[in-house]
Image: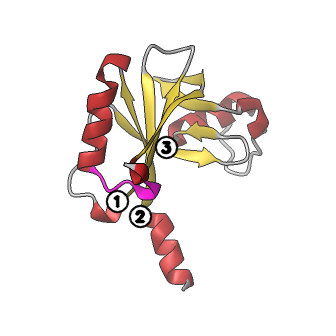
Amino acid sequence: MMEQSNEFFDLNKLFATFTTPAALEDTVATINRKYSILFGKIFVLESPQSDELICTYNIDTGNMTASPMANTILLHRKKESNTLYTINALNTLIKSLNDGYLDKNFMVNWQDYKNSILLTNGPELRKLDTAIFKIVDFSRQ
């Protein structure tokens, strides 16, 4: 049983697709058509630091037949602080907090990044505060 559970987590990936408010409906429809969305939900986030909306969703990469959509990135999530981040952003954050050194054992105070998404823009860390704009629930349709 444990092996199946680990396999599920290996295949379960959190994606984020960036879109404009005007293109949101089309983007959500494309995501739903292109991927097998786990849990049947897309969480659409907004940020005061961005004009774009961020569609976040879990997919089963075992059922993925093509490369990710345009404007889509792979994310990770710290549940206790609801922080979304890329690995590059995490590495950049650790270096900025640890005198320029990347230490895989460095402890990040995730509460400092509560309800945000951490990205990189070249070598720079970019923190976007986030709030739920809309939840699209396909299981109720």
Would you say the residues marked 1 and 3 are in contact, meaning their CB atoms lie under 8 Å apart? no
Residue 38 on the magenta segment: yes
Report the residue that reaches farthest toward the left. Answer: 66
Give the class, few, some or many, for how many residues have Cα within 10 Å of label 1's Cα (few <14, many ≥20).
some
Provide the residue span drawn in magenta: 35-40
Q: Quadrant of residue 64?
A: bottom left
Give the class, few, some or many, for how many residues have Cα within 10 Å of label 3's Cα (few <14, many ≥20).
many
- Vertical position of residue 68 compared to residue 112: above or below: below
Residue 61: which numbered mark, if any? 1
Amino acid type of the residue tagged 1 in the rendering: Thr
The secondary structure type at the circle numbered 1 is helix
Answer with mark 3 or mark 2, whichever residue precedes in sequence.
Answer: 2
Answer with mark 1 or mark 3, whichever residue precedes in sequence.
Answer: 1
Q: Between 121 and 2, which is closer to the camera in this rendering?
A: 2
CA gap between label 3 and label 2 equals 13 Å
CA gap between label 1 and label 2 equals 5 Å
Residue 133 on the magenta segment: no
Amino acid type of the residue tagged 2 in the rendering: Leu
Q: Between 48 and 121, which is closer to the camera in this rendering?
A: 48
CA gap between label 1 and label 3 equals 14 Å
Instruction: Identify the colour scheme used.
Output: secondary structure
Q: Which residue is mark 3?
A: 75
The secondary structure type at the circle numbered 2 is helix
Q: Which residue is mark 2?
A: 11
Amino acid type of the residue tagged 3 in the rendering: Leu
- Vertical position of residue 6 compared to residue 111: above or below: below
**Residue 139 seen in the current view:** yes
Identify the residue at horizontal 35%, vertical 19% (top origin). 20
